[in-house]
Image (tube, grey):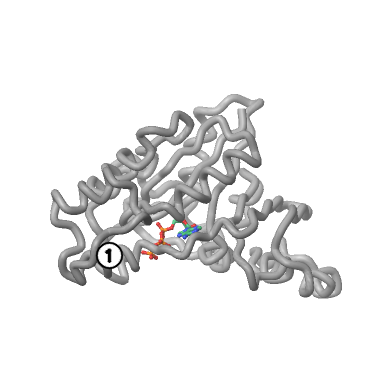
Amino acid sequence: MNIALFGGTFDPIHQGHLALAREAQERFQLGCVYFTPANVPPHKQQHPISSYFHRYAMVALATMNEKAFVPSLLEAPGEAPVTASTGKKGHAQAGANYTIDTVRRLKQTLRKSDRLFFLIGIDAFKDIASWHDGVALFRECEFIVASRPGYSLADVAHALPETLRPRSAVTKPFAKQPAKGDLVLPGATVHLLENVHQNVSATAIRDAVAAKKPLTKFVDSAVADYIKKMGLYRSK
Ligand code: ATP
């Protein structure tokens, strides 16, 4: 079966996330997409993040009606201790969840014949070279990246961890090619989804709530009700 891991802060989950997952599901016949909210430790937060439990609840509500969309507890508090990966290349930080650890724990539950993909937006993919043990992550799974107009295939190739990055002579012709199709390199397979990006972000949703603006079509109605009921995002 084709399976995808979709990690994020999901504070809150919105239609951009769901559109990415739906498009990936269709193109790669995904039998299961694990929506995995990260348990971001307090010292890693640049701005206050809602509790893991609120974010998980909203993921569960938003995925409720899609059979193949599964809310995942893989990074729940206490589920994802820092593991032996500390000490490898990348930015290791005590108390943090690392995607490589989550991917490896998920893979322990999969069959040999399963094919694992990692879903990510191009904004987040741009920083992939700084992720802890990024090279190993590309070895463990294929990437599905939601692209956006304005990005070239060269931008995607340049974002790769240094040891996986093709030489500039190779990427030069990529500069004029839009980020679409597949990039298959030694050690990394990246599939690009074109124009999935909906013009919405969790930041914009939090700002809208704080400004007492109505929550529009960008959030699932059950999530909008939950935000209201629990009084989330009222102050910035
Ligand atoms: P914030 O505004 O708080 O930074 P966000 O909307 O980017 O949050 P995250 O939970 O940080 O949401 O994103 C999880 C993943 O979803 C990331 O890989 C991100 O690139 C991707 N993503 C977020 N918004 C969109 C969107 N509108 N379209 C496609 N992908 C998206």
Report the front residue among 162 and 199. Answer: 199
Q: Residue at x 21, y 47 (%)?
A: 225
Q: Split into 4 quadrants, where in the image is the C terminus?
A: bottom left
Place of residue 15 in the rendered image (x, y in percent of width and height, measured from the top left): 42, 52
Q: Secondary structure at mark 1?
A: helix
For label 1, count other residues whose C-alpha is less than 10 Å away and answer few (under 14), some (14-19) or many (20+).
many
Place of residue 163 in the rendered image (x, y in percent of width and height, measured from the top left): 71, 64
Q: Is residue 213 left or right of residue 9?
A: left
> Dividing the picture into quarters, in which one does residue 234 lie?
bottom left
Camera sees residue 138: yes
Q: Is residue 182 left or right of residue 42?
A: right
Report the front residue among 89 and 159. Answer: 159
Q: Split into 4 quadrants, where in the image is the N terminus?
A: top right
Q: Is residue 214 left or right of residue 18?
A: left
In the image, residue 35 above or below residue 168? above
Q: Residue at x 20, y 62 (%)?
A: 233
Q: Is residue 122 left or right of residue 67?
A: right
Q: Residue at x 57, y 46 (%)?
A: 23
Place of residue 227 in the rendered image (x, y in percent of width and height, measured from the top left): 21, 52
Ligand 1 is within 8 Å of the C-beta of the residue at disc 1: yes
Q: Residue at x 28, y 66 (%)?
A: 43
Quarter of the displayed picture in which ligand 1 can be seen: bottom left
- What number of labels is visible? 1
**Residue marked by disc 1:** 206
Camera sees residue 163: no
Place of residue 235 in the rendered image (x, y in percent of width and height, measured from the top left): 16, 69
| Kind of residue indicated by mark 1 | Arg
In the image, residue 97 above or below residue 46? above
> Dividing the picture into quarters, in which one does residue 171 lie?
bottom right
